Amino acid sequence: MDRYLVFGHPVRHSKSPFIHTLFARQTQQELEYGLAEPAVDEFAHALRTFFDQGGKGCNVTVPFKEQAFTLVDCLSPRAKRAGAVNTIKLTDDGVLLGDNTDGAGLVADLKSHGVMLADSRILLLGAGGAARGALAPLLAELPSELVVTNRTHTKAQQLAAEFHDLGPVTAQTYEQLAGPFDLVINSTSASLQGELPPLAPVLIHTDIAIYDMMYGASDTAFISWAKQHGARQTMDGLGMLVEQAAEAFTVWRGIRPGTKQVLRELKRNLGVI
Ligand code: ATR
């Protein structure tokens, strides 16, 4: 049976096996999908061993995405832009192809929620790996403006300069931000420490769409905060998780699974509904 897995550390709580098992059932594909948690300095060896032993493809998550970028034989254009790899496929020619489906997953999820991206003013919080992966797919939707803001301003400036050729992206400090924005995307890891990005509440209004790439069984700290300040449309990153997985499944199997039912089952599994 064709074997796939996700590499991460820690990875025990990953929902990827659950999601891909449902995709395989739905599309009647014969495959198994597992977990691998190598020590941080043993990822390269573990990856090689997996493919030497007949593995067909894998996902890569924190903290290995940048390392995976350097270990594959070739890169998709979107992985090259993202500077990170979250999906690897062993091609029929024996080549390890590195791809990145995170940004596509974000855009697919935003669209499934009916969020208009064309001609919109988008504010992206954070300038780390998650923000980098999102920039090109967001700019491809032709927003009128995409502002990147980050606690460490130089990192936002670097990102804006790097993606400037793809569209109207600028960097501003949190203090400089002037609304109205149509969509705010939180790509920071602030909520992992129970913190909030230092966004002025005045930027939140009733017609704004709020997206947090994080998710949990209950509202993230950022979503709770945005709701308190009047945001009516809030979305967490669970849909992005399922959509990036669907994109990876499509890369591997050449068949696109449906995501709605799988997202519902995942929510039930997490106790969200
Ligand atoms: P990821 O790959 O998930 O993007 P990362 O590359 O470590 O993770 O980036 C984390 C991002 O969250 C950074 O933009 C970081 O800001 P700094 O560049 O200033 O470190 C941002 N971040 C983390 N904690 C934050 C906090 N409490 N407030 C605001 N931004 C925060």
Image (tube, rainbow, N blue to C red):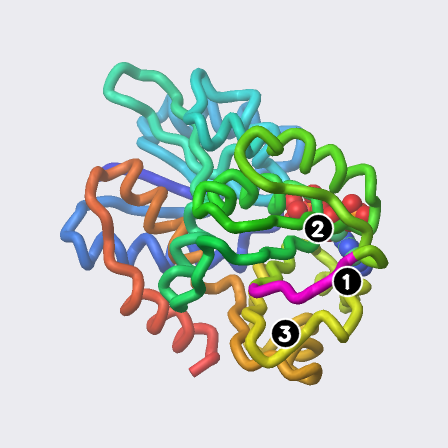
The residue type indicated by label 3 comes to: Ile
- Quadrant in which residue 54 is drawn: top left
User: In this picture, is 197 found above or below 143?
Assistant: below
Given the image, on which type of amino acid does mark 2 rest? Gly
- Compared with 19, 8 (above or below) is above
Residue 144 x/y as whole percent: 54, 50
Q: Secondary structure at mark 2?
A: loop
Q: Are marks 1 and 2 in contact (CB under 8 Å)?
A: yes
The yes-or-no answer for disc 3 within 8 Å of ligand 1 is: no
**Mark nearer the N terminus (3 vs 2):** 2
Task: State the residue position of label 2.
Answer: 126
Residue pointed to by mark 3:
223
Three-letter amino acid code at disc 1? Answer: Pro
Q: Which residue is tagged 1?
A: 197
233 on left or right of 55:
right
Label 2 near ligand 1 (CB < 8 Å): yes
Residue 9: give x, y in percent of width and height.
Answer: 61, 45
Point 33% across, 50% down: residue: 246
- Residue 192 is left or right of residue 52, and the answer is right
Up/down of 109 relative to 101, above or below: below
Which residue is nearer to you in this view: 173 or 14?
A: 173
Q: Return the disc, 3 or 1, that comes first in the chain's sequence.
A: 1
Circle 1 Cα neighbour tier, 10 Å, few/some/many (<14 / 14–19 / ≥20): some
Name the outermost residue toward the left: 28
**Magenta stretch in the rendered image:** 177-182
Residue 128 locus on image (x, y percent): 69, 43
